[in-house]
């Protein structure tokens, strides 16, 4: 164990939590790594706001289930004031202090022979100048919240019509854990319908875990939201979307799940727009990566900016 860091194991017996909390809100009590991560969440969000291009993958909705399921270990680097969420291959750094301290944390991990993922471009450029390997990892898309709710311009006229019609033919609800089975079934449907695409961002177990533990998740992260969309004619659930804050001014949608056979055009975009309405105080949304040509096309049209993140190694 390093003198400069405290290892917080999250393997079975140390950090993995039960599929269901003992009672609503007990999630953080069952896992010390989760408890420490969540206790530091306000500081992380403030520090992420000062970091060039904070990644959507560092949001609590992405990190919490992976820590709870034992996919990620957590480690606090005291000297550099960064929180690490790691698997066997790579480290991901969440700042707790300044950009300079974050850079120091990246260099410290590289000197230990570790690979660091989700490194913002300006810092990756410094690392490259130091002789380390730098590889482009992913491009993420920044959206204006107001544009998600009401897509601007004549080129989005057809999308606005789809959203208007969806509003007439659908019923929107906030997720009720008592209806979790319907949401879990829709998640299975989405993965079955999209199995041939083999998205690298597939993460069914994490989404299932969030749905199954939603009351505890919302207790730990009060700004977490999940909206469902039902077809008014049959009240069948046809789409759902989750989100939470990434920083104080930026939120992120964690997932778009929908039935491709639903009788409503662009129902996924409609669910996304309804989720955006729940974050009126956050002007920007980080939409994450684009894994197919069609997804990249609509994100490119909607985004006002993109950001590139890198993997760095020795």
Image (cartoon, rainbow, N blue to C red):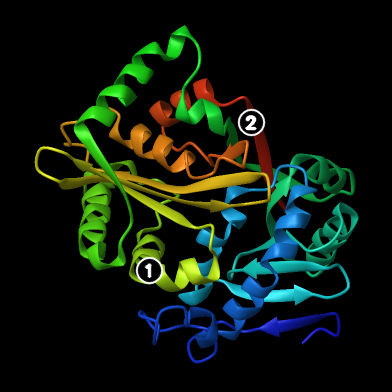
Q: Toward which corner of the image does residue 288 lie, by quadrant?
A: top right
Q: Is residue 87 above or below residue 224?
A: below
- Between the residue at mark 2 and the residue at mark 1, the CA separation in whole angstroms equals 30 Å
Q: Which mark is residue 209?
A: 1
Residue 193 figure quarter: top left
Mark 2 = which residue?
306
Task: Give residue 299's mark.
Answer: none
Give coordinates of residue 200: x percent, y percent.
Answer: 44, 49
Query: What residue occupies the far top of the structure in this picture?
Result: 154
Q: Which is more toward the observer, 46 or 75?
A: 46
- Residue 53: image x %, image y %? 71, 42
Q: Residue at x 79, y 62 (%)?
A: 110
18 to 137, vertically: above or below: below
Quadrant of image for the C terminus: bottom right
Depth check, front residue: 290 or 266: 266
Q: Quadrant of the N terminus?
A: bottom right
Q: Is residue 314 visible?
A: no
Circle 2 crowding by C-alpha within 10 Å: few under 14, some 14–19, many from 20? some
> Compared to 88, does 182 lie above or below?
above
């Amino acid at each position: 164990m390093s003198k400069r860091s405290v290892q917080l194991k999250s393997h079975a017996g140390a950090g993995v939590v039960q599929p269901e909390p003992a009672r609503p809100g007990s999630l953080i009590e069952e896992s010390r790594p989760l408890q420490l991560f969540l206790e530091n969440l306000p500081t992380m969000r403030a520090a992420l706001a000062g970091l060039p291009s904070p990644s959507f993958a560092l949001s609590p909705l992405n990190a919490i289930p992976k820590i709870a399921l034992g996919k990620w270990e957590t480690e606090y680097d005291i000297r550099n004031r960064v929180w690490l969420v790691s698997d066997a291959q790579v480290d991901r750094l969440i700042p707790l202090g300044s950009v300079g301290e974050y850079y120091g944390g990246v260099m410290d991990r590289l000197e230990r022979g570790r690979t660091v993922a989700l490194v913002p471009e300006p810092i990756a450029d410094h690392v490259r100048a130091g002789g380390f390997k730098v590889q482009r990892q992913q491009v993420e898309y920044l959206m204006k919240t107001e544009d998600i709710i009401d897509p601007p311009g004549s080129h989005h006229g057809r999308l606005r019509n789809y959203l208007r019609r969806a509003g007439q033919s659908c019923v929107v609800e906030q997720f009720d854990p008592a209806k979790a089975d319907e949401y879990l079934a829709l998640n299975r449907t989405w993965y079955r319908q999209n199995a041939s695409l083999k998205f690298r961002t597939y993460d069914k177990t994490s989404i299932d875990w969030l749905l199954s533990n939603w009351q505890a998740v919302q207790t730990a992260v009060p700004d977490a939201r999940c909206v469902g969309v039902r077809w008014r004619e049959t009240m069948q659930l046809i789409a759902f979307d989750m989100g939470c804050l990434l920083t104080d001014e930026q939120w992120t949608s964690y997932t778009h799940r929908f039935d491709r056979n639903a009788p409503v055009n662009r129902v996924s975009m409609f669910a996304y727009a309804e989720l955006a309405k729940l974050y009126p105080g956050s002007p920007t949304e980080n939409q994450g990566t684009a894994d197919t040509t069609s997804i990249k096309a609509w994100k490119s049209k909607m985004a006002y900016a993109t950001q590139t993140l890198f993997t760095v190694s020795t």
